[in-house]
């Protein structure tokens, strides 16, 4: 998953500037909220939430064997790209 550094806000920024953060979520689909420089929460736009809800409802409608097929296609643990806060900070420079 690629995360734009523009879609990351601090917890204090979220508290102080909720409206601006909500608008940012609308622009990017979601924003990541950091607390003490660690991921704490994600704020989704309604559009992104609705898009994900359709997918979740579809997955819930599948039978176990079909879910297993989908899971097999997902990247395995360790094969996923991991980002640390230091990595994100370096990208911001």
Image (cartoon, helix red, strand yellow):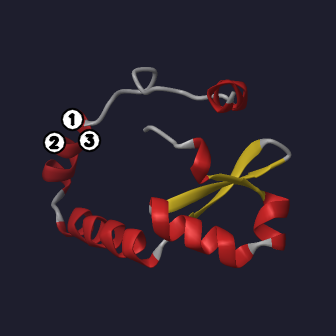
Judge by depth and name the residue closer to the eye, 19 or 63.
Answer: 19
Question: What is the quadrant of residue 14 in the picture?
Answer: bottom right
Which x, y percent locates residue 66? Answer: 13, 51
Q: Are marks 3 and 2 in contact (CB under 8 Å)?
A: yes
Q: Which mark is residue 32?
A: none
Q: Residue at x 45, y 63 (%)?
A: 29
Q: Residue at x 51, y 61 (%)?
A: 30
Q: Which residue is mark 3?
A: 71
Quadrant housing the C terminus: top right
In-image side of 40 versus 82 (left or right): right
Q: CA distance from mark 3 to mark 2?
A: 5 Å
Q: Residue at x 26, y 41 (%)?
A: 71
Q: Secondary structure at mark 1?
A: helix
In this figure, what is the number of numbered marks?
3
Q: Are marks 1 and 3 in contact (CB under 8 Å)?
A: yes
Q: Residue at x 16, y 42 (%)?
A: 69
Q: Which residue is mark 1?
A: 73
Q: Can residue 44 be seen by looking at this rendering?
A: no
In-image side of 93 versus 26 (left or right): right
Q: Which residue is mark 2?
A: 69
Judge by depth and name the residue closer to the eye, 23 or 29.
Answer: 23
Q: CA distance from mark 1 to mark 3?
A: 5 Å
Which x, y percent locates residue 18? Answer: 72, 75
Q: Are marks 2 and 1 in contact (CB under 8 Å)?
A: yes
């Amino acid at each position: 998953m690629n995360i734009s550094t523009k879609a990351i806000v601090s917890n204090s920024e979220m508290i102080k500037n909720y409206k601006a953060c909500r608008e940012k979520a609308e622009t990017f689909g979601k924003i990541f909220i950091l607390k003490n420089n660690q991921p704490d929460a994600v704020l989704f736009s309604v559009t992104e939430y609705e898009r994900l809800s359709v997918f979740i409802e579809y997955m819930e409608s599948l039978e176990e064997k079909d879910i297993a097929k989908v899971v097999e296609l997902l990247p395995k643990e360790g094969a996923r790209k991991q980002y640390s806060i230091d990595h994100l900070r370096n990208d911001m420079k």
